[in-house]
């Protein structure tokens, strides 16, 4: 369970490298997915994960559960004003409630270990929510999850963890759960509260992942298939300068590359107008959005070597998970390809392209015959 | 023809095309049935005709019409009467201002399509099942045919027949021998075309099905990867050039490389080599290579203009000079066959593994079938279009020389200005006047005709034919038109749009990569020699026989062609970006213009310089 030599038993946290998919119910999709990647030998920024018990302990000790139940029980999801004011109140309550001492100590210790060798400054980390549930890592759900970048100092990390938890009660997240519940059981029985439900729409719980920041020169997203046609032999890459937020948030027209999974060659590329980028804020707390210098805006942001490294990475990740993956990645400012390439997240490609235009399965000779206008034998319908 | 008719659809009516200046009477060069005539106007005006610039990029000389008639007789016979391809009969052609337009005859009656399907399945199935054995017999037939052509003698017309005619039992007189030889020569050409098309439809059909299968399941797969998976390792078409590479290496080993200087003629190089013992041994080695590998044509063989490397060694010698220079620069010039084979099997295995369960077996079966048929697809051109045809044109030159010798022509080469039936007529009169001793009319009759036609052909060559005539079809459904010419519905619509002009040409992405450079428009094989290093070749269609110049150019753009043409295959082998089937590149681009060729997207952009006339 714990690292050799670690004296105290960790109840709420584990190193990401010890997690696997089986830990999803307790640590959430994000953390367990990162653990999977690490166990497959894929380079992921070092970090630790908090389990849902940390959140529940927090709610219990702060006495917040009854407040939550009360505020949400009587709400209709169509009452937007009501949802918003309830959410604002719950967020405020969560963010101002004290962190239980045991959780606080564990976070501080695990964070301290991340600092590792660089004792000169507190390590900058990313704090990300790690939601529980079947489609918790899906693209549709992911939009509601919180990420705090460039967080430094144990105190700030603890605040960020609380902010992640609070995001469970953002109006978007609450409405999403209400819609999901209504799709399951019909609108009449919708309850926005936490009690009584199960599964993805049940009492919301959340893990948190804390990872060392990658100071990204370039980052982006890639699909291990063609996201439009579904072609399994293609890797589609979107990339832009700085941290991945610019690409994920659609704030730039990224460079687009389509690569052959089989040979790695560039099949198609279009260089985008990369007008803005996110980088570490001066002083090292948080990030800033800034204009990209004009001469870099239309510069190809990935070299052929880096593209080759991405193809190799895509092949490995896909092979490990056995399905097409949607991978967020970053290339660190320091270091050289391929060791400066990190995976920040990988999840199955959700909106699987429709392939009904695909030719029907048939024998080779029947296909040749149809080339010459010989209709295939009538089939049972 | 001179009557003006409003255009139907986006393309001009075939009846609205005027002859270029001073070309009146061009019709006399062609058979009556090759012309758009009033009796068929109702039908012909409402059909879609496209310029077959892939096979006939320049105006047809009268004699060369045999290479329209005979192939279309042969392709129709196999497609329509032997295999009975269900939706398509044969291909009609018409000539406008010297250029060949073609149009398929569809089968539309569902009952007839069903009836034909029965024939097709049985007969095509037999060929696919026994392909390798049947193709082996085919090669033997072709070699026998080429041998017979070599043995065919064109008799002289002696003042006195030899004694054998007088005293022997089995000798004919020269008048009969000559007419017989001419008739036989024509029949041998027909026979070659018959053989040519025996396997062509089925071979391209199997390969085309594999291509479509790959593109259906793997829409992003580069054409090059499909070709790499199928292509043979030891390809006959690459043999001539690989022999040149071997000879270049030999020249370096024997310290003869100083003879291979850029700009020298083959004769100058031969003369220098002949001065040393090592040089003479190298020349002897070259002689051994020439039969059969110098039977490559300098172009795609359907015109008498295309000579073989034997007739015109400038292309192989230019290649030798290039190979010697590359070797001296330390480059590896041999095709890395082991690597090509490894990569071909790796691609097949990896793509197969990416497919879902139910598609994997048909993928591997279609690939296996494509590899089975591919030797024919790759090799038939060498046997038919190059080896046979270059020798055959030379045989016709022998008849031309005889006619010239007797004053019927000013120059033996003028024989190609007469139709094959006119040549038969001229030979009739030649042997008649030889026999009777009377005064022939031919020497007054034929030379002015040949002279006039040469002038007309020159002027027609400057005319730019529209890519298509008649009615724009809603959809191109003829499998042969799509497969052999790459003329698809999208392509035709693109041509129609281009009638309005513009700076961008669209075609099929035949070989990936993007380059910018100076265009070199090549309309006939004579202009191939003008190509300079680093230029972009713009032509009606590329020919694999031009292989050696592919090491000079940076990209290729063609008017017509699909991804399955030999041309596209060789282009990819050389790793050159290529856009094929643009419809009007040779008309819209001029030599010297800067263009950008995007072979990955199939787009050609005209950058600077003057627009084509």
Image (cartoon, coloured by chain):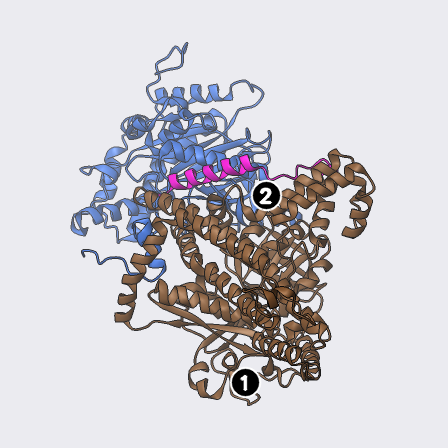
Q: Is residue B90 left or right of residue B334?
A: left
Residue bearing the label numbered 2: A301
Local SS, label 1: helix
Provide the letter of the chain coloured blue.
A
Residue bearing the label numbered 1: B16
* Structural distance between the alpha carbons of marks 2 and 1: 55 Å
What secondary structure prevails in the magenta region? helix
On what subunit does the disc labeled 1 rest?
B
Viewer-side residue, B232 vs A194: B232
Q: Is residue B609 left or right of residue B16?
A: right
- Could you say where residue B150 lies in the image, as x and y percent from the top left? 59, 57
Viewer-side residue, B591 vs B268: B268
- Could you say where residue B143 lies in the image, as x and y percent from the top left? 52, 52
Q: Is residue B344 magenta?
A: yes
Q: How many residues crowd mark 2 within 10 Å: few (<14), some (14–19), many (20+)? A: some
* Residue A374 tag number: none
Q: Which residues are magenta?
A: B327-355
On what subunit does the disc labeled 2 rest?
A
- Rendered-image quadrant of the C terminus of chain B: bottom right
Q: How many marks?
A: 2
Residue B60 figure quarter? bottom right
Q: Are marks 2 and 1 on the same chain?
A: no
* Residue at image point 40% right, 45% down: B367
Residue A142 figure quarter? top left
Q: Which hue belongs to chain B?
A: brown
């Amino acid at each position: 369970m714990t690292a050799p030599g670690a004296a105290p038993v960790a109840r709420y946290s584990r190193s990401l490298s010890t997690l696997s998919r089986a830990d999803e119910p307790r640590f959430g999709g994000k953390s367990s997915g990162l653990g999977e990647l690490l166990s497959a030998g894929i380079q992921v920024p070092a970090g630790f994960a908090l389990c849902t018990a940390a959140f529940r302990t927090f709610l219990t000790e702060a006495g917040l559960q009854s407040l939550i139940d009360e505020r949400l029980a009587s709400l209709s999801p169509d009452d937007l004003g009501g949802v918003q004011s309830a959410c604002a109140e719950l967020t405020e309550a969560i963010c101002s409630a004290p962190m239980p001492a045991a959780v606080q100590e564990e976070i501080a210790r695990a964070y301290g270990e991340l600092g590792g060798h660089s004792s000169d400054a507190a390590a900058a980390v990313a704090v990300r929510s790690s939601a529980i549930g079947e489609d918790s890592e899906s693209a549709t759900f992911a939009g509601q999850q919180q990420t705090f970048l460039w967080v430094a100092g144990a105190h700030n990390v603890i605040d960020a963890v609380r902010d992640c938890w609070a995001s469970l009660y953002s109006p978007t997240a609450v409405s999403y759960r209400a819609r999901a519940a209504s799709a399951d059981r019909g609108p009449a029985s919708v309850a926005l509260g936490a009690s009584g439900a199960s599964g993805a729409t049940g009492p919301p719980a959340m893990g948190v992942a804390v990872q060392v920041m990658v100071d990204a020169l370039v980052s982006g997203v890639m699909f291990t298939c063609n996201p439009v046609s579904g072609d399994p032999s293609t890797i589609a890459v979107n990339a832009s300068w700085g941290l991945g937020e610019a690409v994920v948030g659609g704030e730039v027209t990224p460079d687009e590359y389509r690569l052959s999974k089989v040979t790695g060659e560039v099949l198609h590329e279009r260089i985008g107008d990369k007008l803005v980028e996110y980088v570490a804020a001066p002083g090292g707390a948080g990030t800033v959005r800034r204009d990209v210098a004009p001469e870099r805006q239309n510069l190809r942001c990935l070299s052929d070597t880096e593209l080759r490294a991405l193809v190799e990475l895509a092949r490995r990740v896909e092979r490990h998970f056995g399905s097409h993956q949607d991978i967020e990645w970053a290339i660190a400012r320091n270091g050289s390809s391929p060791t400066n390439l990190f995976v920040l997240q990988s999840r199955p490609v959700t909106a699987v392209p429709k392939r009904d235009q695909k030719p029907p399965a048939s024998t080779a000779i029947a296909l040749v015959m149809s080339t010459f206008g010989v209709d295939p034998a009538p089939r049972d319908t | 023809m001179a009557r003006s008719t409003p255009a139907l659809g986006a393309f001009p009516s075939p009846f609205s095309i005027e002859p270029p200046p001073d070309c009146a009477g061009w019709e006399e060069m062609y058979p009556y049935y090759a012309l758009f005539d009033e009796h068929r106007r109702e039908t012909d005006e409402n059909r879609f005709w496209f310029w077959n610039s892939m096979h006939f990029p320049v105006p047809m000389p009268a004699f060369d019409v045999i290479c329209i008639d005979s192939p279309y007789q042969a392709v129709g016979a196999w497609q329509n009467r032997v295999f009975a391809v269900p939706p398509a009969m044969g291909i009609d052609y018409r000539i406008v201002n010297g250029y060949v337009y073609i149009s398929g005859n569809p089968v539309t009656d569902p009952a007839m399509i069903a009836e034909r399907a029965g024939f097709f399945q049985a007969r095509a199935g037999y060929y696919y099942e026994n392909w390798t054995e049947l193709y082996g017999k085919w090669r033997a037939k072709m070699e026998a045919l080429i041998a017979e052509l070599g043995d065919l003698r064109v008799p002289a017309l002696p003042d006195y027949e030899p004694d054998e005619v007088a005293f022997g039992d089995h000798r004919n007189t020269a008048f009969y021998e000559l007419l017989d030889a001419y008739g036989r020569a024509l029949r041998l050409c027909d026979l070659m075309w018959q053989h040519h098309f025996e396997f062509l439809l089925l071979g391209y059909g199997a390969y085309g099905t594999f291509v479509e299968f790959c593109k259906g399941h793997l829409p992003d797969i580069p054409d090059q990867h499909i070709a790499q998976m199928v292509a043979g390792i030891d390809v006959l078409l690459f043999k001539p050039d690989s022999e040149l590479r071997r000879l270049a290496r030999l020249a370096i080993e024997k310290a003869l490389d100083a003879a291979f200087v850029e700009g020298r003629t083959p004769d100058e190089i031969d003369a220098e080599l002949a001065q040393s013992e090592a040089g003479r041994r190298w020349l002897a080695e070259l002689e051994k290579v020439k039969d059969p590998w110098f039977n490559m044509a300098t172009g795609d063989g359907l015109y008498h203009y295309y000579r073989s490397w034997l007739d015109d060694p400038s292309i192989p010698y230019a290649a030798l000079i290039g190979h010697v220079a590359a070797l001296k620069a330390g480059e590896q010039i041999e095709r890395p066959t082991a690597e090509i084979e490894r990569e071909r099997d790796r691609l097949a295995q990896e793509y197969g593994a990416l497919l879902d369960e139910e598609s994997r077996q048909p993928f591997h079966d279609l690939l296996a079938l494509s590899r089975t048929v591919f030797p024919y697809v790759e090799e038939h051109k060498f046997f038919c279009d190059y080896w046979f045809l270059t020798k055959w044109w030379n045989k016709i030159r022998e008849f031309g020389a005889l006619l010239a010798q007797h004053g019927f022509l000013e120059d033996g080469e003028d024989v190609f200005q007469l139709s094959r039936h006119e040549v038969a007529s001229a030979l009739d009169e030649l042997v008649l006047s030889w026999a009777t001793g009377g005064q022939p009319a031919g020497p007054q009759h034929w030379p002015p005709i040949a002279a006039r036609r040469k002038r007309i052909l020159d002027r027609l060559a400057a005319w730019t034919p529209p890519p298509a005539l008649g009615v724009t079809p809603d959809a191109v459904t003829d499998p042969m038109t799509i497969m052999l010419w790459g003329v698809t519905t999208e392509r035709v619509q693109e041509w129609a749009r281009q009638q309005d002009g513009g700076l961008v040409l669209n075609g099929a992405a035949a070989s990936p990569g993007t380059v910018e450079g100076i265009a070199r428009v090549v309309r006939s094989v004579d202009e191939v020699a003008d190509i300079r290093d680093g230029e972009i070749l713009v032509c009606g269609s590329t020919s694999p026989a031009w292989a050696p110049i592919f090491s000079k150019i940076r990209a290729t753009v063609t008017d017509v062609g699909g991804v399955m043409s030999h041309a596209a295959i060789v282009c990819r082998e050389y790793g050159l970006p290529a856009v094929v089937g643009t419809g009007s590149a040779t008309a819209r681009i001029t030599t010297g213009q800067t263009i950008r060729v995007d072979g990955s997207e199939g787009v050609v952009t005209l950058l600077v310089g003057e627009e084509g006339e």
